[in-house]
Image: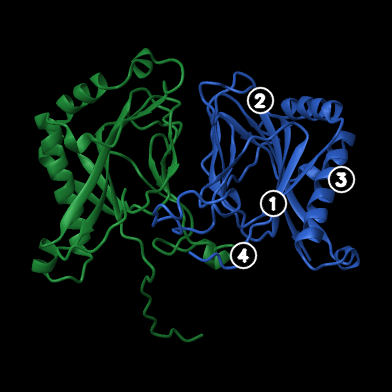
Amino acid sequence: MSAPAVHVVPIFATPFGVVTLPQAATLNSALGTLLSERAPPQWRAARGPGALMFRSREDLGEWPEEPVRRLMSEMLAGVSAVAASISELAEQDFAALRMDARAWFTLVRPDGCVPAKSYANSSWLAVYCVSAPEPSSARVDSGVLRLYESRLGTMFQDPAGSAARLPYRSGHCTWRPVPGEMAVFPAALTHEIALVRAAGILVLVSARVRFVGSGGAWMPPW
Amino acid sequence: MVTPSVSLQGVFAVPLGTARLTECQRLNRELEALFLAREDNEHRNPMPSHIPQAETFESRFNLFRWPEPCVQELRKFVLDSVVTTVLQATKLLPADLARLTLHNHTWFHISRQAGSFVAHNHPMASWSAVYCVRAGEPVPAEPESGVLRLLDPRYGAGAYRDAANSQLHPAFALTPLDLRLNEGQVIVFPSYLFHEVTPFYGRDTRITVATNCWFA
């Protein structure tokens, strides 16, 4: 058999960015303390409804505390950098866009998880890790961010297709939250935080973001 | 505003069959005892397609080849439910189906505290079914405990929301469908449908039998 010259490129690709926030990482201790203090009694009591996972209101961006304000600033800058990196807009046009953001924090105990979710009327989701349990040797997916496979054209498989590599392989993708790092991906992508099966509490700050043009184009309420 | 005569119908619908085995207690207790007795490495699935969990035991995929009467009784009910669903959802006639061989991979799951199963579908199969042997105790503090969740296959359709598409009738809703299975209940759905089992927080066990079917 001859060896044809083949050129293969990914199409319909999903962007997934990982951004290290060096300044935010120095805030993690203060953030962890602040966010834990703001959790409701049932979370702190560790029993009853909401004892395994707590998700705050989406008002974190309005908190006046300095660690939160600095984190929000870095997170939005990171999202903007990811979005700009794949945009064909001219630099000055992209810079003219305004960002809308809603942010919240999530606390997850062992045996807790964050159910699968996607977000409407938003373009990007950012998930920043404040603190995370150590990886579990017995459970490789403990506490990971799992992004669900979104392509349904995978119902037929043959041995060659089943062994495809990324980004062509079908199946979910995972990212392990690391303190100081932030994942950025399309907000329409269904995702979850898998069951935490290691000692410690997973603390995340999330923001859903959209860009608004200077022309005042209508955007749906969110 | 005039009110035009509008005919509204669902399109791109997903078929979901449900059936209930009446008088299922005896069968389910026999199945439960058998499965618990064989919750061991000899009967464990040696090639799991997903990350194995200590809290959820998955058997080999040959369950319906076991000769035990309780298994064969379940096999008849589950596969008959699949066939009946196929007849209702397709243009096939019973005589058409009778000429085909129904192949299946069938296994059981035993979930304990915090056991779950990640979202997945079943390539190379046309119909899947889940039968509930034991539902496990409900946990009021965790209302989503042990739910079988069917994910909406219209990926991204809900990414834009406004007031006019946020309160769709259930048949048109762009949301997952959560099913809390009852003992003796079987559901049948297309194998392309992504589904998951949320973490089970009961103090006892949740036991189900799942099958993937293909016809040739």
Looking at numbered disc 4 in the image, what kind of residue is underneath it? Answer: Val
In the rendered structure, which disc, 2 or 4, sits on the residue that comes first in sequence?
4
**Closer to the camera, B193 or A94?**
A94
Q: Is residue A179 left or right of residue A9?
A: left
Q: Chain of mark 2?
A: B
Rounded to the nearest whole Å, what is the CA distance between mark 3 and mark 1? 19 Å
Looking at numbered disc 2 in the image, what kind of residue is underneath it? Answer: Gly
Element at label 3: helix
B176 up-or-down from A202: above or below: below
Looking at numbered disc 3 in the image, what kind of residue is underneath it? Answer: Lys
Disc sitting over residue B76 in the figure: 3
Q: What is chain B's hue in the picture?
A: blue
Disc sitting over residue B11 in the figure: 4
Residue ID at (64%, 35%):
B180
A213 up-or-down from B172: above or below: below
In the rendered structure, which disc, 1 or 2, sits on the residue that comes first in sequence?
1
Other residues around mark 4 within 10 Å, as few (<14) / some (14–19) / many (≥20): few
- Is residue A117 in sight in this rendering? yes
Q: Is residue B123 left or right of residue A49?
A: right
B126 up-or-down from A131: above or below: below
In the rendered structure, which disc, 3 or 1, sits on the residue that comes first in sequence?
1
Rounded to the nearest whole Å, what is the CA distance between mark 1 and mark 4? 14 Å
A33 up-or-down from B170: above or below: above
Query: Residues at badges 3 and 2 in contact (C-beta under 8 Å)?
Result: no
- Is residue A21 in sight in this rendering? no
Q: What is chain A's hue in the picture?
A: green
Disc sitting over residue B16 in the figure: 1
